[in-house]
Amino acid sequence: MENQEKTINLKALLASAAQSGEPSSYLEPYAFKGAPEDALRTLEAKGFQTYRGKVRECLSSSDKIYLIHTDNLSAFDRFITMVPFKGVLLAAISRYWYEAMGGSIKHAYLASPHPRILEMKQLQPVKVEVIVRAYLAGSMLRSYQTGVRNFCGQQLPDGLQAYDRLPKPIVTPTSKAEAFEHDENKSPAELIHEGHVANEQVWAEIEAMALQLFQLGSETYDRCGWIFADTKYEFGTDSEGHIYLIDEVHTPDSSRLWKKSTYHKCLKQNLPPQMFDKELVRRYLSSQGFLGEGAVPPVPYTLIFELLQSYLGIYESLAGEELCFSDTELASVFS
């Protein structure tokens, strides 16, 4: 659909898709799998370096990097399916958060020249995923249920139940793997010893920035009626060693978001919280016996559509407006 320049109101388009009775057929033509190979080769000839990640493509110049959000959905470090417009929503949510930060946090964001693109400063990535958790969920829950109480160097108390709130937010880092490879849980001491982080002072600054960001996210999402259960951050350094936030921020692809008003009711009924992130798909895959190995089970389109509507609802609750954007060609950004 990129050859037709028009303004899209995503809420109205999804309503039309639902009314059509066949949202899959209605929306699939909009799915963006990434820039064509010939377009990438043209950009490489212009001096850009290209890289394909799990859900984003990166174009790098000497001083900037452009994060292009595809509609790919990954889980368990595998490609799962396509979710039309997911990339537009992730870029819009990250853009909201970067603009909301102002100067309170050093970050790499410069502009958004296209609905799918974040233009960022070119920095040296710290090869660590910095995960902040306020609730017992995900891989930490699975580890806890096997009896493990020390997780990434953090000592967890006995007696926690699934999805309980932790005594305080904690930072549980992992090493940063290549696309579709497995990240590894690490303690801060291991990160430093293995050379992922330069020294204790650098880690202390990264940890403090992550906790400050998490507090901002928690307070804002709380006002919107969401529980901000956990999230991941990535950081980079400039030539002088200053640390900056890079990559996506507080999106439902990188975070767990639960409905605040039903949280306690769900737990009393021994049910998981109402989730509005890609955990919807993870849980479905788990119910099919898939945890990353073997063939990926087909995901029902009703679930894909539910996920897309959830992402849009998160954006609208944050921004206080419907998402409208111009459907322009990616090539126009780099011409």
Image (spheres, rainbow, N blue to C red):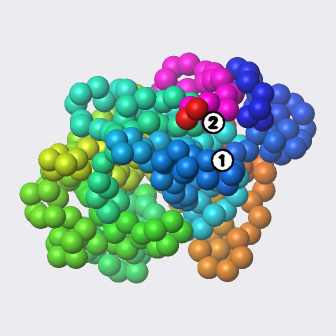
Q: Residue placed at 12% from the left, 64% from the top?
A: 199
In this view, the residue farthest toward the right is 21
Question: Would residue 160 be visible to someone looking at this image?
Answer: no
Residue 69 x, y percent position in the rendering: 57, 44
Quarter containing the C terminus = top right
Residue beneath disc 2: 331
User: Which picture quadrant has residue 152?
Assistant: bottom left
Residue kind at label 1, given as amino acid type? Ala
Query: What span is in magenta?
Result: 316-333
Is residue 124 something one can see in this rendering?
Answer: yes
Residue 64 belongs to magenta span: no
User: What is the x, y in percent for residue 317?
Assistant: 52, 27
Q: Nearer the viewer, residue 120 or 63?
A: 63
Where the N terminus falls, by quadrant?
top right
Coordinates of residue 110 in the picture (x, y in percent): 37, 31
Give the alpha-carbon distance from disc 2 to disc 1, as whole Å: 8 Å
2 and 1 marks in contact (CB < 8 Å)? yes
| Residue found 19% across the figure and 49% down from its top | 239
Task: Check disc 1 and report the residue beneath it.
Answer: 39
